[in-house]
Image: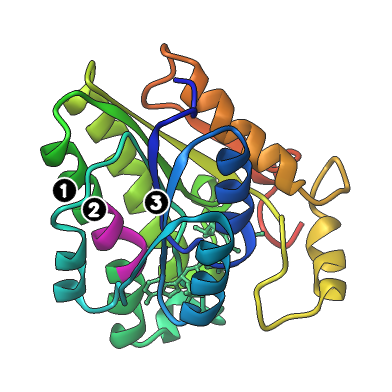
Amino acid sequence: MNPEGKNILITGAARRIGLFIAETLHRQGAKITIHCNSSRSEADRIAEKYGWQVIQADFSRPEELEKFNHIVCDVLINCASIFRPVSSLAVESEESIREHFEVNFFSPLRLIKKVIAANPAGGVIINFLDQEIFLPCPAGGAYSLSKRALAGATLELARENAPAWRTCAIAPGPVLPPPHLPDSKMEKVLRRVPTGRKIGLDEIAGTVLYIMNTPSLNGAIITLDGGEHLYPVGM
Ligand SMILES: NC(=O)c1ccc[n+]([C@@H]2O[C@H](COP(=O)([O-])OP(=O)(O)OC[C@H]3O[C@@H](n4cnc5c(N)ncnc54)[C@H](OP(=O)(O)O)[C@@H]3O)[C@@H](O)[C@H]2O)c1
């Protein structure tokens, strides 16, 4: 699918990875709608610059998903996510586990259902996961669990909704440090990445385009992590 003229909704795209993808697809002629939560002023500024639409919604509040009831798009990219590190799943509060599942699993799933129902002509769904889904990662807590649930949904949806809709996912390794941490924190993480380097934003955007442009890709989870998923955490 060529992005030119396509309606593309990207969640969590006022900043960071989502924004980079939105700008890349914009340059290729796509009509972009970005979703944001707390970054409304950044989203409005960018949207004004490029002529994009903005939808603001807090995914921890299911009723806010109603703001997407009338959205019609050809491509949905589920990028929005929360990640709160914990020492172990055993100590993570039920409230935190529920919030991670609302934002990282239920909201993307609700959005997918809405966009599929609104556009029977079909399109492409791309879910952002994490290489952590491949090995037990207790310190990933509910974040890892919720991404694993979304990985499972990706496979199920790919089977159920083809040929009209293809559903794929990208499972990145380290691209950017969490917003509250400095770049230097990436050094420790990079020690367990066999290629020894961060994943480039251009590689992420290139993989989005690859999925869009490859009609036989459906139910594919593309690991983009320099091989990090091959090593148990702590090694
Ligand atoms: N960064 C990495 O190195 C890395 C590694 C592996 C996987 N990933 C995955 O790749 C994707 C993009 O990564 P990222 O680092 O760009 O993500 P991020 O900055 O952690 O989060 C993206 C956006 O999610 C939105 N969000 C957070 N809580 C929300 C809520 N309650 N309701 C609605 N939106 C909410 C935020 O929007 P506002 O700013 O508007 O509040 C935020 O800008 C994520 O799915 C992440 O799990 C990233």
| 181 lies left or right of 105 | right
* Circle 3/circle 2 CB separation < 8 Å: no
Report the span colored magenta: 103-109
* Helix, strand or loop for the magenta stretch, by majority: helix
- 210 above or below 109? above
The quadrant of the picture occupied by the N terminus is top left
Instruction: Note whether residue 224 is visible.
Output: no
What residue would you read off at disc 3?
148
* Circle 1/circle 3 CB separation < 8 Å: no
Judge by depth and name the residue closer to the eye, 141 or 225: 225
Judge by depth and name the residue closer to the eye, 85 or 181: 181
Query: Separation of disc 1 and disc 3 at Cα?
Result: 21 Å
- Residue drawn 48% across and 37% down? 30
Q: Where does the image place residue 89, in percent across and percent down from the top left?
A: 44, 75
Check mark 2 vs ligand 1: CB closer than 8 Å? yes or no. no
- Residue drawn 32% across and 34% down? 74
Mark 2 closeness class: few <14, some 14–19, many ≥20 residues within 10 Å:
many
Amino acid carrying mark 3 in the image: Arg
Q: Where does the image place residue 218, in percent across and percent down from the top left?
A: 37, 22
Amino acid carrying mark 1 in the image: Lys
Mark 3 closeness class: few <14, some 14–19, many ≥20 residues within 10 Å:
many
Callout 2: SS: helix
* Circle 1/circle 2 CB separation < 8 Å: yes
Q: Identify the mark at residue 111; answer none if there is no mark.
A: 2
Total marks placed: 3
| 174 lies left or right of 64 | right
The quadrant of the picture occupied by the C terminus is bottom right
Callout 1: SS: helix
Task: Point out the tag, 1 or 3, that comes first from the N-terminus.
Answer: 1
Query: Separation of disc 3 and disc 2 at Cα?
Result: 18 Å
What residue would you read off at disc 1?
114
